[in-house]
Image (cartoon, helix red, strand yellow):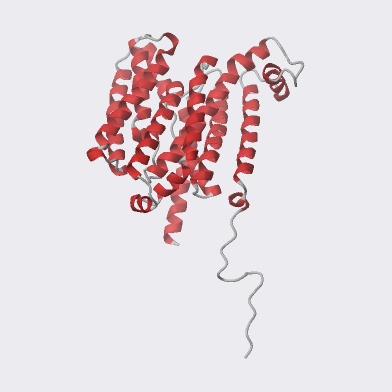
């Protein structure tokens, strides 16, 4: 009796399929590659606009200002002013906003075990919009030029506190209860915001609507310090909690069996998300789909381990929003398109593709 030899091309039947190279790549290499792409994207984005500035000139201007020992000469005059005072702070803020949204989306989707979780589910985004629109329409300026971001941040914290109060029955914080409370509070806040916009003078409607849809126009250096610091600190802290996030994905019983205090960890992470979103939305307005879209895209490439997903999602979100902002200021010159419009146009088809893939897997 002859025994047929196994087909060497197919390998043993018990052998697991080989993972794609990206999933096997070391995290430092992936982070370094995305960081390099982000740096190049930011320099390129600074040069793009109604007045185009060559990539080399942008790099020279930035290098001469911040690395004078390495770059001796650089263009001066109007080009230097455009690079350093107009576009560079805007690009830096765009990168910080994109990173913050993507990091928060990653955390919320793990904490709530809901693939559709985003900042609107904790009330922060809708509250920020309410606070900012109230200041715009009422003409209030108690903090001078900082009145708008301060009002947006306070609005975000107020609505988030309301959501936590409604969701925290018996000292617990169940994901389903939190989502329902967040949806209710967000709907109520958005209804009041829309009423304020509809009953406001015409001169205030455009600025209020543009802010609600998100934008980075008019960014100055004084606007970027706090968001960058908060996003950086928040993203680093989230990454230190990535092991706990992986445990929370297993469900409450699974995480508890691993020794995790589920409700306490969940509460801390959600409060951290609210603080980051409050700082981000206070300077950029409501920008949707980034927090939903980026974490899913990263998971498709590198898998579901949050130790890898979190830093890569933050960098990917930063890159995405830098280029979305370029499109916002170039597609309809001399006017700008709200960033939220572009992210919605990109995000809606992305999720239709995800749903189609999920349906195919279900029936296979």
| Apparent side of residue 118 relative to residue 219 in the rendered image (left or right) | left
Q: Residue shown at 43%/32% (left/top)?
A: 288
55 vs 150, left or right, is: right
Q: x, y (%) of residue 201?
A: 34, 11
Would you place residue 14 above or below residue 163 in this image? below
**Residue 104 falls in image quadrant:** top left
222 horizontally vs 249: left or right: right
- Residue sitting at 51 percent across and 32 percent down? 99
Q: Nearer the viewer, residue 112 or 243?
A: 243
Give the mark count: 0
Q: Where is residue 349 in the image (x, y as percent from the top left)?
A: 47, 41
Q: Position of residue 250 (x, y in %)?
A: 39, 52
Residue 328 visible, this orientation: no
The residue most toward the bottom is 1
- Against 9, residue 150 (above or below) is above
Extreme residue in the front direction: 259
Question: Where does residue 67 sit, x and y in percent of width and height?
Answer: 70, 20
Quadrant location of the N terminus in the rendered image: bottom right
Q: Residue at x 43, y 40 (%)?
A: 107
């Amino acid at each position: 009796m002859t025994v047929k030899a196994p087909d060497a091309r197919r390998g043993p039947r018990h052998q697991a399929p080989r993972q794609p190279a990206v999933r096997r790549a070391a995290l430092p290499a992936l982070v370094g590659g995305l960081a390099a792409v982000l740096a190049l994207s930011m320099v390129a984005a600074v040069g793009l606009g109604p007045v185009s500035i060559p990539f080399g000139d942008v790099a020279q201007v930035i290098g001469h200002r911040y690395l004078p020992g390495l770059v001796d000469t650089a263009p001066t005059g109007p080009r230097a002013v455009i690079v350093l005072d107009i576009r560079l702070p805007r690009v830096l803020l765009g990168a910080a906003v994109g990173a913050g949204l993507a990091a928060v989306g990653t955390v919320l989707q793990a904490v709530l075990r809901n693939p559709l979780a985003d900042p609107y589910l904790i009330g922060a985004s809708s509250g920020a919009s309410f606070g900012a629109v109230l200041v715009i329409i009422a003409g209030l300026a108690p903090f001078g030029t900082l009145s708008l971001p301060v009002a947006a941040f306070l609005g975000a914290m107020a609505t988030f506190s309301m959501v936590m109060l409604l969701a925290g029955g018996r000292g617990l914080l169940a994901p389903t209860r939190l989502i329902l409370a967040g949806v209710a509070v967000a709907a109520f806040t958005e209804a009041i915001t829309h009423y304020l916009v509809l009953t406001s003078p015409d001169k205030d409607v455009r600025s209020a609507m543009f802010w609600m849809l998100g934008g980075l126009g008019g960014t100055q250096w004084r606007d970027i310090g706090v968001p960058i610091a908060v996003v950086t600190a928040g993203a680093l802290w989230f990454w230190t909690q990535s092991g706990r996030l992986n445990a929370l994905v297993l469900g409450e019983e699974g995480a508890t069996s691993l020794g995790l205090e589920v409700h306490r960890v969940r509460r801390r992470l959600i409060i951290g998300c609210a603080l980051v979103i409050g700082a981000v939305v206070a300077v950029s307005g409501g920008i949707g789909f980034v927090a939903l879209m980026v974490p899913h895209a990263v998971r498709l490439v590198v898998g579901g381990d949050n130790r890898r997903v979190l830093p890569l999602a933050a960098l990917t979100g930063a890159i995405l929003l830098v280029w979305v902002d370029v499109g916002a200021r170039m597609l309809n010159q001399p006017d700008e398109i709200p960033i939220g419009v572009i992210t919605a146009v990109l995000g809606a088809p992305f999720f239709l593709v995800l749903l189609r893939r999920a349906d195919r897997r279900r029936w296979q």
